[in-house]
């Protein structure tokens, strides 16, 4: 009987981990279906982001699909900042560690900005570099 009581917490932990894994798998499958409509897309536990042409759509992942979706046009973006621990850092030389990692999109016609969270610094840096190049090309085409 004592051995059974000792194994009970392990059994509970196993079922909890299996349930968590199932939930994460459902989120990934919902994301995969959602991401098919985009040219470039990203998933992590904090946010999903997709790019289609000049539009960026982002939201929070759930088992039913992304929620709280917001879309904005890169034509309206004045600057893209790479934030680590709520401080702007150089995207070409990112720090190795940080608690909060975000890309901030600052709009030219609004005081409001959009911050998209990331879990990994290298992933955020790659997205930031790509989108900064894309934005720079858009602005160069607009000036011509």
Image (spheres, helix red, strand yellow):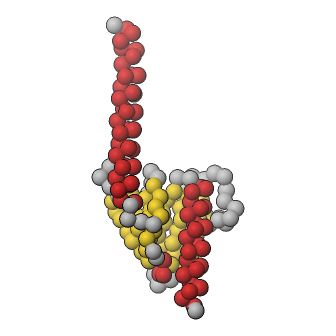
On the rendered image, what quadrant is the C terminus found in?
Answer: bottom right
Q: Position of residue 131 (x, y in %)?
A: 55, 70
Q: Nearer the viewer, residue 62 or 53?
A: 53
Residue 121 lies left or right of residue 59; in this view the side is right
Above or below residue 70? Residue 144 is below
Q: Nearer the viewer, residue 65 or 121?
A: 65
On the rendered image, what quadrant is the N terminus found in?
Answer: top left
User: Which residue is situated farthest in the right direction here?
Assistant: 93
How many numbered badges does the structure rendering display?
0
Q: Position of residue 27 (x, y in %)?
A: 36, 49
Residue 38 lies left or right of residue 129; in this view the side is left
Residue 142 lies left or right of residue 92; in this view the side is left
User: Which residue is situated farthest in the left direction here?
Assistant: 64
Q: Residue at horizontal 38%, vertical 61%?
A: 36
Q: Residue at horizontal 59%, vertical 62%?
A: 126
Q: Position of residue 46 (x, y in %)?
A: 45, 54
Above or below residue 134? Residue 123 is above
Q: Nearer the viewer, residue 116 or 42?
A: 42
**Can the viewer see residue 50 in this picture?**
yes
Picture quarter containing residue 83? bottom right
Q: Residue at horizontal 42%, vertical 66%?
A: 38
User: Which residue is situated farthest in the bottom direction here?
Assistant: 144
Q: Residue at horizontal 39%, vertical 16%?
A: 7
Q: Position of residue 102 (x, y in %)?
A: 53, 61
């Amino acid at each position: 009987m004592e051995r059974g009581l000792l194994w009970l917490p392990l059994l509970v932990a196993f079922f909890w981990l299996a349930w968590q894994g199932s939930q994460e798998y459902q989120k990934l499958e919902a994301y995969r279906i959602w991401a098919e409509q985009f040219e470039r897309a990203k998933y992590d536990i904090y946010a999903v982001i997709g790019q289609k042409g000049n539009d960026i759509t982002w939201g929070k992942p759930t088992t039913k699909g992304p929620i709280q979706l917001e879309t904005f046009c890169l034509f309206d973006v004045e600057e893209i900042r790479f934030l680590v621990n709520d401080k702007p850092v150089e995207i070409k030389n990112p720090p190795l560690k940080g608690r909060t990692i975000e890309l901030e999109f600052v709009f030219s016609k609004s005081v409001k900005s959009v911050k998209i969270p990331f879990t990994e610094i290298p992933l955020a840096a790659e997205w930031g570099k790509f989108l900064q190049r894309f934005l720079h090309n858009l602005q160069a085409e607009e000036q011509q």
